[in-house]
Amino acid sequence: MAKPLILISSEDLPYTKEERLKREVFSLESRKGMILRDREKAKRQQGTITMLEHEICYLQREIEIRERRRAAHAKFLQKRSERRAKRR
């Protein structure tokens, strides 16, 4: 029985820890690399490679969203702190 491409469902993606997302990206990229090393295998499994690339993109997008959200929140807190300091 073949191992599923991704172990994180789309419903659980927003609630998954970032460390697990990064590990999953690394794992999928490793699997893709192993397939691409063998040219014959790469030709036969082009569909698998495409699915791996899509899954990697979904996970990387989630990581990017979290990084931007973290940066926006830090910016918000900085502005709020500056406004409070001006009131004093």
Image (tube, rainbow, N blue to C red):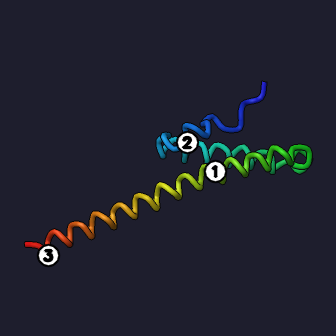
Residue denoted by label 2: 13
Q: Residue at x 58, y 38 (%)?
A: 11
State yes or no: discs 2 and 1 in contact (Cβ < 8 Å). yes
Q: Secondary structure at mark 3?
A: helix
Label 3 vs label 1, nearer the camera: 3
Q: Is residue 88 left or right of residue 1?
A: left
Q: Residue at x 79, y 50 (%)?
A: 50
Q: Crowdedness of circle 2 by 10 Å Cα count: few (<14), some, many (20+)?
A: some
Judging depth in this view, the residue of 69 and 17 nearest the camera is 69
Q: Residue at x 91, y 44 (%)?
A: 44
Image spot of residue 45 (x, y percent): 86, 44
Residue denoted by label 1: 58
Residue denoted by label 3: 86
Q: Is residue 67 left or right of residue 37?
A: left
Furthest residue toward front: 87
Q: Earlier in the sequence, mark 2 or mark 3?
A: 2
Q: Is residue 7 left or right of residue 80?
A: right
Q: Is residue 68 left or right of residue 80?
A: right
Amino acid at circle 3 = Lys
Furthest residue toward left: 88
Image spot of residue 16 (x, y percent): 50, 40
Image spot of residue 29 (x, y percent): 68, 49
Q: Earlier in the sequence, mark 2 or mark 1?
A: 2
Residue 55 drawn above or below residue 1 = below
